Image (cartoon, rainbow, N blue to C red):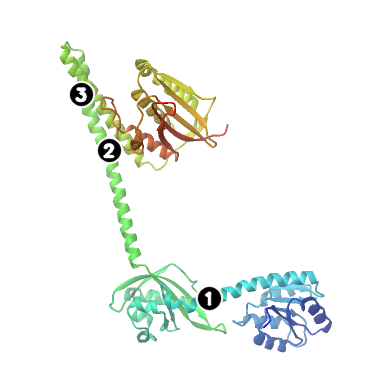
Amino acid sequence: MSSKNRILIVDDEKINVALLKSYLAETYDVDIASRAEDALEMVKQEQPDLILLDVVMPGMDGFDVCRIIKQDYKLDFIPIIMLTSLTSKDDHQRGIEVGADDFLKKPADKFELNKKITALLRIKKQHDLLLLDRNKAYKYLDYVGVLVAVLDRDYKLIHINKKGADILGYNRNNIINRDWLDLFVADSYAKTVKSRYDKLLNKKLKPSEDYEYPVMTITRKEKLFKWYESILKDDKGDFAGILISGEDITEKRKDEIKLIEYANQLKHSNELKDLFTDVLRHDLLNPAGLIRSFVEILEETETTDQQKRIIGNIKKSNLKLMELIEDASDLAKLESMEEMAFVRIDLESLVNNVRDNFTPDMKNKDIMMDLATKGPCPALANPMIEGVLDNLVSNAIKYSPSKTTITVTIDDIGDRWKISVMDQGDGIPDKDKSAVFNRFNRLHKENIKGNGIGLAIVKRIVDLHEESIGVKDNPEGKGTIFWFTLKKIQS
């Protein structure tokens, strides 16, 4: 059997046939028909891969032949190139209406002819492969994981795959020719489904892939299905049935409902948490503020040295309590945020401001700060980023011995800035580095103040910037480096 594509030339002029055959014979198997009737018979018998069809012929013309072929369900995808000496727009429009795939003016140019034939045969090959895949799919219908059935015009079941029968709990032979709506569709949906199928038969409804209705199993238990419906046609293009395929989504829908309920519970829980945070902050800060006021009054009274020490301890503990309340409230609000607004910030100016703010603290411990920057460093950030740098510098001062240096650097790493705060303290053991940003987790000595929330706040602010943060050892000796990144703005 020849592996060449078969082309049918339909033309009553011998000179045209000879010319076309000389162009094509070396590459294709060529058949010839000089009459329209002969051409139609050859098309049905041989089913060529492409047809070159003359328009003007005795008796039935090329337009009629093209229309008849394109109306045949089996033949409608055979490409047809109409050969014509006619040049009017009306002739071309008529060719389009009867289904012609392309046009070529006579006498045909060899290059133009080959170009059109090659393009149309490539399309037909893809179509043939699709048909082959479809036929294979039909063979495997019994093994697919969905219900596949065919209904007749009266909505009686004329075919159902094995999987579908198993889902419904029936033997296939016992339900063929049974009324689908009466036996399987839940009563509350039967009228709606019938109306839908009526519209589908009358071409008033396009196939839909997301229509849902429940069906009844043999035990009269409802199962919810997601349906796809379409009209099947036979070899002649006539109605052959309604194809329905359905996926059982009963459990999936139950899970979706549970998920929605859980989401609503989470939303309510978050609202309660926000309310609780506001109430807690307000109700705790009020008495803490009163304690601070009373302590200030006591400080102004004449007291013994022991009383002064007690009042001092009360003042420190109260300040620590107020910081804890404020930090816990800030962290709760940050965790409820999903996004934040960004503006242009110069990191060099930001670092200088932070240094000025902590100058008294550094003087008290005889600590120096070295700023390693090289001019303006414009970044895209929220003003809250200053709190990140404040916290990291504050911690560096707390945990650094006297007469040491804290170094703040801003490095250019491509499309981002990397801001690092390096101290010369005791450092953080490797086993603790992964937990250092956890809330209420303080890894340092008991005699150093701090509530363990600060780094959790720092981490959350950086996360809202969709940036990175980390901690590592100081490579120059004792101490730690905390770093984070920010998006760069090109100046």
Point out the image quarter for the N terminus.
Answer: bottom right
Q: Where is residue 151 drawn, in percent x and y?
A: 43, 81
Q: How crowded is the residue under tag 3: few (<14 C-alpha within 10 Å), some, or many (20+)?
A: some
In the image, residue 403 sits, relative to residue 70, either above or below, namely above
Comparing 260 with 313, the one in front is 313
Q: Amino acid at mark 2?
A: Thr
Q: How crowded is the residue under tag 2: few (<14 C-alpha within 10 Å), some, or many (20+)?
A: some
Specify which label sits upstream in the sequence, 2 or 1.
Answer: 1
Label 1 to label 3: alpha-carbon separation: 82 Å
Q: Can residue 179 be seen?
A: yes
Q: How crowded is the residue under tag 1: few (<14 C-alpha within 10 Å), some, or many (20+)?
A: few
Q: Can residue 201 be seen?
A: no
Q: Secondary structure at mark 2?
A: helix
Q: Amino acid at mark 1?
A: Arg
Numbered circle sitting on residue 134? 1
Query: In the displayed image of the protein, which residue is found farthest to the front?
Result: 477
Q: Which residue is mark 3?
A: 291
Q: Nearer the viewer, mark 2 or mark 1?
A: 1
Q: Secondary structure at mark 3?
A: helix
In the image, residue 302 sits, relative to residue 23, either above or below, namely above
Q: Which residue is mark 2?
A: 277
Looking at the image, do the residues carrying marks 3 and 2 touch, with CB atoms under 8 Å apart? no
Comparing 313 with 271, the one in front is 313
Q: Residue at x 43, y 67 (%)?
A: 210
- Asked where in the image residue 110 lies, by quadrant, the reply is bottom right
Give the left or right position of residue 413, taking residue 93 as reference.
left
